[in-house]
Amino acid sequence: MLYDVILIGGGVVGCATARELARYSLSVALLEKTEDICNGQSKANTAIVHGGYDAAPGSNKAKFNVRGNAMFERIAEELSVPFSRNGSLVVSFEESGIPALLALKQRGEANGVKGLSILGREALLAREPNLNPAAQAALDVPSGGIVCPYELTIAYAENAAQNGVTFFRDAPVTAVSRNADGTFLVSSPAGEFASRAVVNCAGVHSAELNNMVSEEKHSITARRGEYYIVDKAYRDAFHSTIFQLPTAMGKGVLIAPTVDGTILIGPTADDIPDKDDTRTTAEGLARVLSRAKLSWPGLPARAFITTYAGVRAHAETDDFILGEPADAPLFFNALGVESPGLSAAPALGEFLAQSVAERLGTAPNPAFDPIRPGIPKFRDMTDAERAEIIARDPEYAKIVCRCELVTEAEIRASIRRPVGARTVDGIKRRTRAGMGRCQAGFCLPRTLELLAEELAASPLSITKCGGESRYLESNLFSGKAGE
Ligand SMILES: Cc1cc2nc3c(=O)[nH]c(=O)nc-3n(C[C@H](O)[C@H](O)[C@H](O)COP(=O)(O)OP(=O)(O)OC[C@H]3O[C@@H](n4cnc5c(N)ncnc54)[C@H](O)[C@@H]3O)c2cc1C
């Protein structure tokens, strides 16, 4: 089949673009390398919807950050994704940092960020009483927000699929070339695909794909960031996202509350040779801890639930590289989309889809439905709502994940949905089962059983995250390995 558009990469940019392309009368397929969507930068970041004060005026980062930020209320409502405008504070712990705060404010205003002001010490400590009392002043960014990055990415994908986009997972693109008629041949072990246009949203691997079709070569540096996650018990410790004003000592780390009540502490920024190396290191985490204490001296190290790392796709231009290279018409790049790429994703999806639709000369899709209903969350319901939903669906009465109060009904729904979960990590990102204090110590066996049942597969074949990450070696009672 000849598709109108093939998207490469199922991160937040690929999935947002897929959903925005579904607004047009186009046949669209998305090819994702790994076993699930949202497995790259989009799953492991700081989950902040940045205000847009940081990027250089006139850059793509600034333009798409500010536009994306303004789109979040509508997107979150249409896709049933939790989003909060909790505000960001860039804190200076030295009086000598105040001119730098003023410069950031000016830069933000040049980028079109609204409502910026400088908070003095007293107002700052009244707003965030757990902040280090050595704080002197802060840039207050009321448009700063937080969103769940995997819920957003998955919701975009589900809505795209609802509107006709086809998703192929376990489909790493190994080559892109031109057929004699000018269409693209996109090769993958999952099959050979033909398309009129290609959109490259391959994150840390986006330069490799660009370099297959264009002489305008690019390179991506993989820059890893490591984090701790603090337990929900501390959900009220901070309300705004706390940035440290960069100093001679480094960029500083963030105290970042999440929409789910945990707090993220990090990240580091270390260039690494292996673009897919998402390991945490003792040394990196030690740096996070010591720098975080500048903002939060009472940081409860015993309340850490877990650690993680994400790898940024840093382009040589230090900016997003977007659109068609001059020598590769109808090949559209979303290359080097590092931070603020999550914040910019709604605007990037809109821009890329409009660019492709214009070049292909297509009409709007009259059947496009922008609404993606979320899976009703037992943990967010009142007692009356719980009684009502259990009466309709008794599987809402069976709690699988005690830490996050996730029910069997939610887990089954996450598997049955379009672009549904196939792995334990897939369930985790769609429902939060396994994300709590015990880190799946309790719910894993039942989650595994539910996956096997819903996918009509042997429990032995169920994996954490695809490939060889199986949990079970053999059936103890059959005595035969692999049965
Ligand atoms: C540590 C860290 C912190 C960050 N914090 C923030 C933040 O707070 N706020 C913010 O706005 N942004 C933040 N970002 C940036 C943001 O996460 C990214 O800009 C955004 O997720 C990029 O999305 P993407 O879809 O372009 O890339 P990705 O999410 O990386 O997706 C790319 C996808 O392409 C797939 N792929 C790769 N090669 C191939 C291939 N050959 N064939 C098929 N598929 C392929 C990958 O498997 C992956 O799923 C952060 C990033 C990191 C790493």
Image (tube, grey):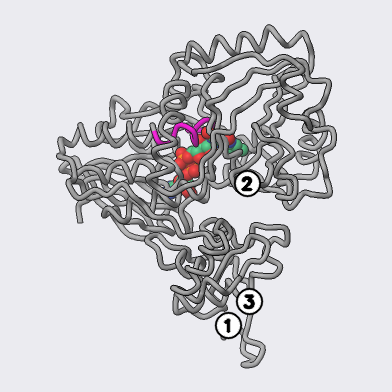
Q: Which residues are magenta?
A: 337-346
Q: The C terminus is located in which quarter?
A: bottom right
Q: Which residue is mark 2?
A: 277
What amino acid type is highlighted by mark number 3?
Leu
116 is higher (above) or lower (below) than 175 = above
Whether tag 3 and tag 1 are in contact, CB under 8 A, the answer is: no
Picture residue at 69% right of the left edge, 61% below the top: 439
Badge nearest the viewer, 3 or 1: 3
What amino acid type is highlighted by mark number 1?
Gly
Q: Which residue is mark 1?
A: 482
Q: Which residue is mark 3?
A: 472
Residue 1 x, y percent position in the rendering? 20, 56
Residue 453 x, y percent position in the rendering? 49, 79
Whether tag 2 and tag 1 are in contact, CB under 8 A, the answer is: no
Q: Is residue 68 magenta?
A: no
Could you tell which of marks 2 and 1 lies nearer the N-terminus? 2
Question: Could you classify mark 1 by the number of other residues whose Cα lies within 10 Å: few (under 14), some (14-19), or many (20 or more)?
Answer: few
